[in-house]
Structure formats: C-alpha cells, structure tokens
Image: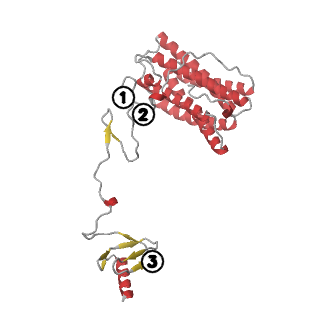
C-alpha cells in the first residue's frame, strides 16, 4: 500500500498536481536535479531522490508567507540637489554624504574634493630653477621635450587657455602611470613604496584639478577634444613603456616638461597683464581648491597653477636623481603634500 501511495504521489508531482497527505499539502513542483527529502509531518512518509523546489500556483489559507516574501512597500529615501534632480540616498549600505560646510557655514558644493584636500599654493617657490643636462640621458630627455614643444607652439600659438587645457590632459598621465607601476611593483615584491605611490597619485590628481579649472575657463572645440583623445592615447602608452624600461629617464622627461609648463604659464600671465587676455573672475572650483579670496581673478589662478608646476618639476627631477644614484624611490622620503 505504501509503495502504491509513493508511486502515485511521485507521478502526480512530476505531472504538476497537488496532493494532501493527512493534513499536509504537497504542492506542484519542478525537479532541479539535486538529492533531497520531502517528509510528511503526520504520516512519516519520506520521498527521496530529488530536491523539489516549490512553484505554487495556490496555497492554503493556513500557510503564511515567509518574512522575506512579504512585499516591502517602503520606498528608498531620496534627497534633492540644488537643481531639483532626485539623488538616491540608500541607507542599506550605511553610506551617505556627510554634512560638510565651508568655514563661513555655507554648504560645500563639491564631491570631487573635500575641504581637507584643499591648500594654499606656495607661490614663493623658485620658478627659474633648471636642471642642466649632465649626461646622455639628461640630454636626450631635454631634446625630446624641446622637440615636443614645436608642434604645440605651431598649433596653439598664443592661445594659452586652449594650450593649457590640452597640456593638462597630458600632464596628469605621468603621475598616474608611475603610481600604478609602483603599486604593482610593491605587490610583486612585497615591499613598501616609501610613500611614493601616494606622492605620484597626488601629482596626477593635482594636474587633473588644473584641467577641471581650465575647462571652466575655456570651452574646448570638437577638434580640440579629438586632439586630446589622440595625444593622450599615444602619450599614455609611450610613457608606460618608457617607465618600465627606464624610470630615471621617465622622471627626467617629466621634470623638463614641467619646466616648459612654467614657461607657458609665465607667458600666459604676461598676456593677462598686457590686456591681450581678459582677466576674468576665477572659477568657483579654483577659489575653493586653492583657498583663494572670493574676488580672485584669472591671474590669481594662473599664478597658483604655475607654482604647482614648479613643485612637480622639483619632485620629478628629485625622483630621477634618486635613480641616477643607483637607489630605489622607496629609499628616499616621498614628498607627500608637496604640490
């Protein structure tokens, strides 16, 4: 008898029918292929051989939904930004934007950097320092940079706003490449980097903020955007290979590139002072990032950017000197916070 009941129930389950054994319901199910057991609570009948996953089309009134099956009609909380757009603020992950204000109590408007990442640029830095080429590597780096300047001068001439915007898309590449390769080296060799990973990534981020500022001042045309894509694609891959082959040459080239950037921004300032370029108010992002006065102008912005480039010059020539001495970067103190 039990064998007959077992055979009937099994056949019915496969065909999608439901049965009642005692007071317990057995619902239509689908075979999923793993072994399991269905047991009757009252009659003690055990069914083995497959795992049965319930796919119920109806269920008795006495059966309640599991807690996880209940419909949650609560909507995720949302906040609105200043433009009226809804911004999802899910509390599930426990992450939400903290309330951040400026010193005067007004809301901090930027997500790309925080108040503790801002600084006052050291504009007293020596802008005239120059690394005199001493050997073949130095001379090769110096001549390479001078050759790269020729097409830039021809294309941009004295349109220093467009020149700065384009060059900053390139200037942010070396720090990122160097930091990335040092990071991978640290993982491979199980060694600390001496803080140089963070120092180079700080440089890359600082150069990127230069670009974000220049974009506020100069709206790039379609062919300038195309030029950026081309130049960045070529430069990234070339610098990546160069850094793998010779970090000392790579840092020396960047040091000379920064010297050229100082020269370009100096010429930019001359045109502002002569009236050839209008001295417009400084963008809000620049005022907050460099802690400039609220009435700061374009001249103030270019002055602090030029100071940053001078610091990058020093960092990269210093890094190249370390390699020329036969040492690794981690053996020397990393210039953290040295914009």
The numbered mark at residue 216 is: none
- 156 vs 86: above or below: above
Q: Quadrant of the N terminus?
A: bottom left
Q: CA distance from mark 2 to mark 3?
A: 57 Å
Q: Are marks 2 and 3 in contact (CB under 8 Å)?
A: no
Q: Tell which circle, 2 or 3, labels the residue nearer the N-terminal end.
A: 3
Could you say whether the residue bearing mark 1 is in a helix, strand or loop?
A: loop
Q: Residue at x 32, y 46 (%)?
A: 76
Classify 10 Å Cα crowding around label 3: few (below 14), some (14-19), many (20 and above): few
Residue 121 spot, x, y in % from top left: 52, 20
Residue 65 spot, x, y in % from top left: 30, 63
Marks 1 and 2: which is nearer the front?
1
Q: CA distance from mark 1 to mark 3?
A: 64 Å
Q: Nearer the viewer, residue 161 or 78?
A: 78
Residue denoted by label 3: 49
Residue denoted by label 1: 107
């Amino acid at each position: 008898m039990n064998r007959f009941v077992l055979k009937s129930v099994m056949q019915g389950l496969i065909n999608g029918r439901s049965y009642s054994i005692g007071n317990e319901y057995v619902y239509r199910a689908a075979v999923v292929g793993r072994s399991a057991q269905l047991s009757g609570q009252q009659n003690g009948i055990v069914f083995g051989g497959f795992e049965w996953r319930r796919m119920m089309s109806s269920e008795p009134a006495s059966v309640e939904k599991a807690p996880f099956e209940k419909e949650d009609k609560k909507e995720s909380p949302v906040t609105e930004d200043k433009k009226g757009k809804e911004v999802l603020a899910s509390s599930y992950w426990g992450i939400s934007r903290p309330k951040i204000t400026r010193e005067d109590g007004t809301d901090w408007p930027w997500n790309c950097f925080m108040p503790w990442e801002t600084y006052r640029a050291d504009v007293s830095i020596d802008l005239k320092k120059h690394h005199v080429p001493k050997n073949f590597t130095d001379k090769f780096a110096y001549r390479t940079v001078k050759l790269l300047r020729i097409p830039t001068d021809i294309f941009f001439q004295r349109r220093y706003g467009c020149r700065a915007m384009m060059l900053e898309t390139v200037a942010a590449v070396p720090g990122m490449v160097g930091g990335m390769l040092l990071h991978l080296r640290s993982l491979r060799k199980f060694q600390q980097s001496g803080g140089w990973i963070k120092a180079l990534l700080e440089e890359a981020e600082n150069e990127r903020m230069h670009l974000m500022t220049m974009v506020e001042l100069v709206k790039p045309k379609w062919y300038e955007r195309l030029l950026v894509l081309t130049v960045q694609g070529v430069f990234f891959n070339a610098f990546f290979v160069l850094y793998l082959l010779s970090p000392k040459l790579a840092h020396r080239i960047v040091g000379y590139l920064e010297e050229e950037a100082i020269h370009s921004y100096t010429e930019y300032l001359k045109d502002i002072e002569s009236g050839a370029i209008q001295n417009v108010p400084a963008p809000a992002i620049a005022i907050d990032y460099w802690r400039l006065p609220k009435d700061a102008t374009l001249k103030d912005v270019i002055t602090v950017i030029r100071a940053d480039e001078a610091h990058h010059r020093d960092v990269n020539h210093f890094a190249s000197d370390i390699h020329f001495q036969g040492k690794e970067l981690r053996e020397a103190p990393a210039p953290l916070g040295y914009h």
